Image (cartoon, rainbow, N blue to C red):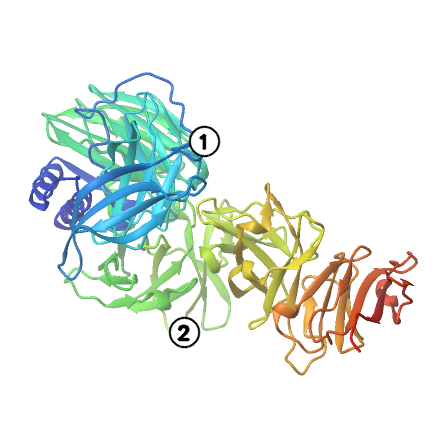
Amino acid sequence: MSDRQLAEMLDRAVNHAPQMHVTGDDMLAAGKGRVRRRRAVGIGGALGTAALVAAVWSGLAGGDGTLLGTTEIQPATSVWEEGETVDAALFTGLQTIDQDQVAHAYDARLGRVTSDGPVTLTLSDGGEVVEEVPAQSPVPGLEVFAGERMTVAVWAEPEGVVASVPLVGPLDPGGPATVQRTQVADEELAYAVWAGDVVPLPQAVRDVYLVGQDEVVSLSGTAVGSEVLRAGGVRALAWSDRERGVWGYAVDGQDSPFLEQLGHWPAQPASFAFSEDGRGGAVTVLPEGAELDRMGLADGEEVDSAALDGREVVLTAAEGDVVPDVTFTLDDATYPLDAYLADLVALDTVGGGQLTVVPDEDGAGGLTLQDRTGTVPVELTLEELGDGVVSRAVHGSTVVVASGWDPGPAVLTASRVELVGADGLPGWAVPSDVAQVALPDGTLLTLMTVDAADGVEVAGAGHQVGGEIERWTPPVTTVGGVEMRLLDGEPVPHLDGGPLERLDDGSLGGVRHYAGASWSGADYLVVPGTGAGEAFVPLVGESDGQVRPAPEAVLDQDVVELGGQPLTVLRVSVSLAQQGRSVVLGGAVQRGSGDAANSWALAGSAASAHVVIDPGAVVTVAADQGVWLLYPQGSTDPEELQAGRTGDDVLRLTAGQDAAELTLVAVHPAGAPGPRVGDVEGELTPTATHDVADLDLVVRTWRTDVGGD
């Protein structure tokens, strides 16, 4: 990335953070002043604005930017008390210009319509109300108003806080507006604004880091480690959030704490450099497992470092305007930081040429490879990259691109390419060169060059661990951005690089229920063996003991293949879990057409059966789930589906039934006494009894008149 591009990007970042009551000209002047005195290095130098300006916040520190105060930080658990009257302006005069060059002047007011309702943000443009957005609270003490025109986050800063840094996700799309403070109901509140006219709206505001003099805490209570660094008269506070793969740092005298979301990219460093008042310095987050080489320091340069969650965070400082470079060792190799960053975004070809890897930040999000003349011999779209390995011939080399592959911190030395020769035999090759960048959506790309020999085909990618090479299996990404992986032979959804928490107790057959991220507002069900076009309906245990089909709880679904087996992954409502445990008792899968009698099946059951009963209904049972289904023969309508507990429930057939007749159905284990059913005239005798011998179950029905002539 050129200095010009870097300066323009930082300029945009600062100018996308408009001060309240400040004109665009004032913001432009302030932004250019900031760019002159600092430079920043993003993920591999080529991730783009999404990570490079992950948190270029202005006005976060107190006064001159010095971190002051020693009070222990105690985050508030709520912004407003339940039922508290709220009626106050949050901000006025926020000026933006949209992509059609139309100017807007926004005012925002907070209010509570009803005493038991949420606080609502009323957004006006030029005095006309354009949105009313109710608050959502992703974590205690944080209120988020996510509208169509902007997202606004509000929180309280407890005593001892000198800076607040919001965390958005799953990736930071470019930074919010300036964090401001205002009085609401006689209490000072902090808030941040993401205006859609100037920055992409975040998918979610996940948390806020509260920065003190020597500690950092999160509103959510997520554990945050921190260390104070001192070198050459410069003081910095660094912190890390291991759970979410975030590192941050704030330098005394600088007004811009930084966040770096590096959890998915162990080989990638990040650095914030400054040159001001005759002194240059930098804070650098080294690649995972890298160690600072103190022997690489020049005379007059001072350094301090600390290990935070597997990464060394380094503060360097020296007299003069030159920013000290950092040298480190990784996998027995020594790298100056600038040379390492350059290596990550450049590919040497077999013939001695060089290609620069450039992610498409403004278009469709693909990738281009540029040679030294500026020619683009290779351009790959997102669709072409996919989730796997693709290759292209360039200047006598074969460029191999592995999309979504992370070979670990030693990507430059341990990456390997699997080739199949003209004789059909596979083998592993050491690439001529390796590069690694990330797309704006966070997808990591590892690129390798090998000799483009005739008859040789690329078969895959892997990385060397000791004397062995571990072959990479491309990820399977599905709804909600989760990645399906096999753990101990079982399909498990992963998010942010880690497995999701399982909520069920294993009694759902092959169906599994997993908790989504707290900020996502959704959980996940994984159903084995289902295919495209098959509707899934969760069966929910209600507090009154009834079983209710809940088709409305399914928000989205996708069919993927993992380990050669089909899976349906469903993004579902968080209402399917209560107090951290699943209330799903099973699932019904609509597998037949209208021509099939047994149009529904119990998902994940090892053995099931279907019994047709009079008058034209079907009972579907399974031995290993404890629930059963009742529906009109051939029906594919989820609204006509009923469910009950084996041995407990007697269901009245509601669909396709004459109003003057009553049909009751029950399922119980063979050998156990069946339910006793009666009316005002006494006990009813079962109309029919069906033994399902293979499953040791019995289906019984009762029919009677309930009125009429």
The residue under the point 16% across, 24% down is: 64
Query: In this view of the protein, which residue sits in the foreground, 307 or 36?
Result: 36
Mark 2 element type: loop
Viewer-nearest residue: 550 or 224? 550
Hey, which residue is sitting farthest front in the picture? Answer: 709
For badge 2, the amino acid type reads: Gly
Return the x and y of residue 377 as percentages of the image width and height.
23, 68
Residue 313 occupies which quadrant of the picture?
top left
Screen quadrant of the C terminus: bottom right
Residue 221, disc = 1
x, y percent for residue 651: 76, 63
Asked if residue 35 lies left or right of residue 420, the reply is left
Side of 657 where 483 appears, left or right = left
Q: Which image quarter: residue 352?
A: bottom left
Disc 1 marks a residue whose amino acid type is Gly
Q: Is residue 129 above or below residue 251?
A: below
Q: Is residue 698 visible?
A: yes
Instruction: Identify the residue under disc 2.
Output: 455
The image shows residue 513, relative to residue 162, as above or below, that is below
How many other residues sit within 10 Å of disc 1, few (<14), some (14-19) or many (≥20)? some
Residue 690: x %, y % from top left? 87, 70
Mark 2 is surrounded, within 10 Å at the Cα level, by few (under 14), some (14 to 19) or many (20 or more) other residues, namely few
Which residue is found at the position 69% from the left and 56% from the top?
A: 547
Tag 1 or tag 2, which sits nearer the N-term?
1
Residue 59 sits in which quadrant? top left
CB within 8 Å, label 2 to label 1: no
